[in-house]
Each structure stands twice: as structure tokens, then as C-alpha cells.
Amino acid sequence: MTTSKPGADTSETRHIGNWLDGYAETLPEPPTPELLELQARLGVFQPAFLEHVLIPFTTNEIDLAALGAVSRQLVPVAGIDSRGQLPHRATASLCAKLSLPLHEVPGGHLGPIERPAQFAAAFKALLREF
């Protein structure tokens, strides 16, 4: 496990397991034919996703007091390849506000799809910690 020290506006970042060793030299796994077919079928739902999921996610305030009350039950996770992007920034900000560590896993926002084997191994290691 690797850990970085938190700064004034950031939280501690953790990498559970040994997946980070040599990670930079790896590439995303090619999608399977089944995944490509599923993505094509799900594409028709993109407008509904944007209207009913993405817009509310990006425009509503979260209840920090409510989350703080259950923070011992939270394990915030973000894909390492999405650093600097909205999903990672939002998770890192939440971690800083709740004084929780940010657990990074392989891949980006869609890590389980981009790197399923690496993501699964890292996620199993993370689950064993809790």
C-alpha cells in the first residue's frame, strides 16, 4: 500500500494492494465483443442519463452533515486515470471535507470496464482491508 500525506485542501491518498507497481506501463484491456454490444444497446439511454443522472449530480448540494454522521461507513474510491477530471475531483473534495482518505484504484471513471482484471484485484484487496 502506498500513501501520500494530505495537504491543506486534500486528503490522504491510498493504494491498497500492489497494483500500482508497474501500473504506468500497462494499457487498458480491449473491450470484449459482449461489452461492445452492451454499450451499443445502452447508448439509446444517453439522453435520459444526462437529464436524470448527470445534471442532478452536478447541480445539487450534498448534505455534508448527514455524510459526516456515517463517515465511518464510507470508503471513497476514484480511478487513478481520472485524476483532474470531475469524478475524481468530486471524490477528492468530499474526502477532504469529511477527513477521509481517498482510495485510488486502476482505471479512470469507468475502471471496471477499462481495466476489469486490474480493477477486480485492487477492489478485492480494498475489501479485505474493511
Image (cartoon, grey):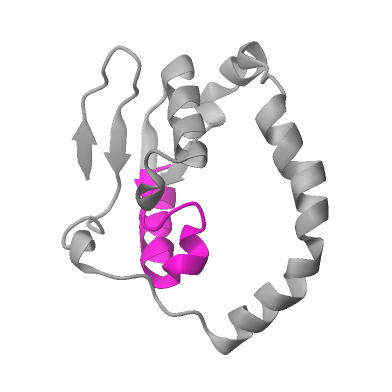
Q: Give the image location of residue 24, x and y in percent.
A: 21, 60
Prevailing secondary structure of the magenta residues: helix
**In this rendering, is residue 46 above or below 30?**
above
**In this rendering, is residue 30 above or below 103?**
below
Residue at 58% in and 88% down: 33
Q: Extreme front residue here?
A: 47
Q: Give the image location of residue 88, x and y in percent.
A: 45, 39
Residues rendered magenta in the picture: 104-130
Which of 96 and 18 lies nearest the eye of the viewer?
96
Q: Quadrant of the C terminus?
A: top left
| Callout count | 0
Q: Give the image location of residue 122, x and y in percent.
A: 36, 57
Q: Is residue 15 magenta?
A: no
**In this rendering, is residue 66 above or below 34?**
above
Residue at 47% in and 16% down: 97
From the viewer's perspective, is 56 left or right of 5?
Answer: right
Residue at 63% in and 11% down: 65
Residue at 36% in and 52% down: 81
From the viewer's perspective, is 40 left or right of 5?
Answer: right
Q: Give the image location of residue 40, x and y in percent.
A: 70, 77
From the viewer's perspective, is 52 left or right of 106?
Answer: right
Q: Quadrant of the N terminus?
A: top left
Q: Is residue 118 magenta?
A: yes
- Residue 5: quarter of image: top left
**In this rendering, is residue 126 above or below 37?**
above
